[in-house]
Image (cartoon, rainbow, N blue to C red):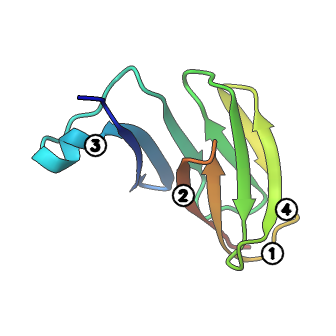
Amino acid sequence: MNDKYIPVYYKKGNETCGNWVNFQYLLTGINEFDKDLPTFTIQPNPADSYIKINNPNNDALELTIVNYMGKKVLETDIKNQNQVINVEQLCNGVYMVNLNNSFNSKLIINR
């Protein structure tokens, strides 16, 4: 059987965390994460002027932020394990953060 992984994200305090989970575990009720797959965090959330992407495996990532209308408002490459992204140009509101077209998380800008 081919393993199929899907992104799963969750809130942990002010951090948004994510991991890849084998779809089979979701169907069988076994809550187990594959430790070899990447984990990302985005903090702080809500954010004011910056967000920090924690990319512990230093994977090549493309970050895209879209507004509630689906318009792309920011796009950048993540090149470091801990990269700070300036979001001062974004207005207060709710945005979706997308990493490599698979990991999605809600981001709130609140000043």
Spatial CA distance of label 1 from label 4 is 8 Å
Give yes or no for contact between labels 4 and 3 (Cβ–Cβ under 8 Å): no
Q: Which residue is mark 1?
A: 91
- The image shows residue 97 at horizontal and vertical percentages of 64, 56
Q: Which residue is mark 4?
A: 88
**Residue 77, quarter of the rendered image:** top right
State the SS at label 1.
loop
Q: Which residue is depicted at the point 28% across and 43% down?
A: 23
Nearer mark to the viewer, of 2 and 4: 2
* Label 3 crowd bin: few (<14), some (14–19), many (20+), radius 10 Å: few
Q: Is residue 74 above or below residue 36?
A: below
Identify residue type, mark 2: Ser
Nearer mark to the viewer, of 3 and 1: 3
Q: Which residue is mark 2?
A: 105
Q: Which mark is residue 23?
A: 3
Q: State the residue in front, 98 or 48.
A: 98
Identify residue type, mark 3: Phe
State the SS at label 3.
helix
Lateral position of residue 26 relative to residue 18, left or right: left
Q: Which residue is depicted at the point 72% across and 59% down?
A: 65
Lateral position of residue 54 relative to residue 39, left or right: right
- 3 or 2: tag closer to the N-terminus: 3
Spatial CA distance of label 3 from label 2 is 19 Å
Q: Is residue 54 above or below residue 91?
A: above
Identify residue type, mark 1: Cys
- 4 or 3: tag closer to the N-terminus: 3
Identify residue type, mark 4: Glu
